[in-house]
Image (cartoon, helix red, strand yellow):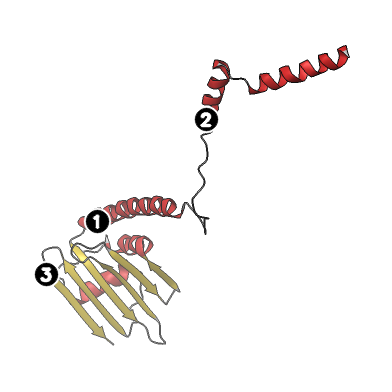
Amino acid sequence: MKRLVITGASVVALALAGCGTDATDDKVEENSNAVNPPVEQPLEPATGDTNQDTDDAVTDTATDSTTDSATKDMQADMDKLSFKEIELEVSYGNNKEYEAEIEQDENEPIKAKVEDELNEMYLTGQEAFDDVYSKVKSLDVTKDSSQQETIDDILKAFNLQADYQEFEVEIKFNDGSKLKIEDRK
């Protein structure tokens, strides 16, 4: 009988100790909530990524800041040139053409593209801009350049052969003037 009373008393004491609250237990519970706050469950069942809006906002912000930075860099490079746009098309027959352009419409981001069928290279955006800019930054073409000087300078800058069938270039200078050359052989 003593054994039953001692065992029963131990069970009751353990049960009361587990249910009891004192200041120490409250602080532990508060601290555990601070580290691991309770997780709220959505009222409706989720049908996909519940963080999609947040993920999109973060991606859009990162893309916007990257795009803004790239646009500023391209604009800074363009400001070093005497012209603001160039469009070049050189045809070699057999459906082989080289096309490159940097276009800068007012209040719009700079656009660039390269369609190089000679080397099977097709670029757009920053990659195209970097490729074209690296070539045009050495151009010494003005609105008063002769047709042959312009053709020779562009062919050299773009590393293109002189045996073209058709050559077209249009350059818009910063002062608003244009140089347009077309040559067919």
53 is higher (above) or lower (below) than 173:
above
Query: Which residue type does callout 1 highlight?
Result: Gln
Q: Residues within 10 Å of mark 2 (few under 14, many from 20)?
A: few
Q: Is residue 115 left or right of residue 12?
A: left
Quadrant of the image containing the N terminus: top right
Q: Please give the name of the residue rendered at 29% of the width and 70% of the height, measured from the top-left corner.
A: 101
| x and y percentages locating residue 129 in the rendered image | 33, 62
Element carrying mark 1 = helix
Residue tagged 1: 75
Residue 166 sits in quarter:
bottom left
Residue tagged 3: 177
Q: Please give the name of the residue rendered at 22% of the width and 82% of the height, measured from the top-left corner.
A: 182
Q: Please give the name of the residue rendered at 21% of the width and 74% of the height, measured from the top-left corner.
A: 170
| x and y percentages locating residue 121 in the rendered image | 43, 71
Q: Residues within 10 Å of mark 1 (few under 14, many from 20)?
A: some
Residue tagged 2: 33
Q: Exactly how many numbered labels are in the figure?
A: 3
Between the C-alphas of marks 1 and 3, the distance is: 19 Å
Between the C-alphas of marks 1 and 2, the distance is: 51 Å
Residue 184 sits in quarter:
bottom left
Query: Which residue type does callout 2 highlight?
Result: Asn
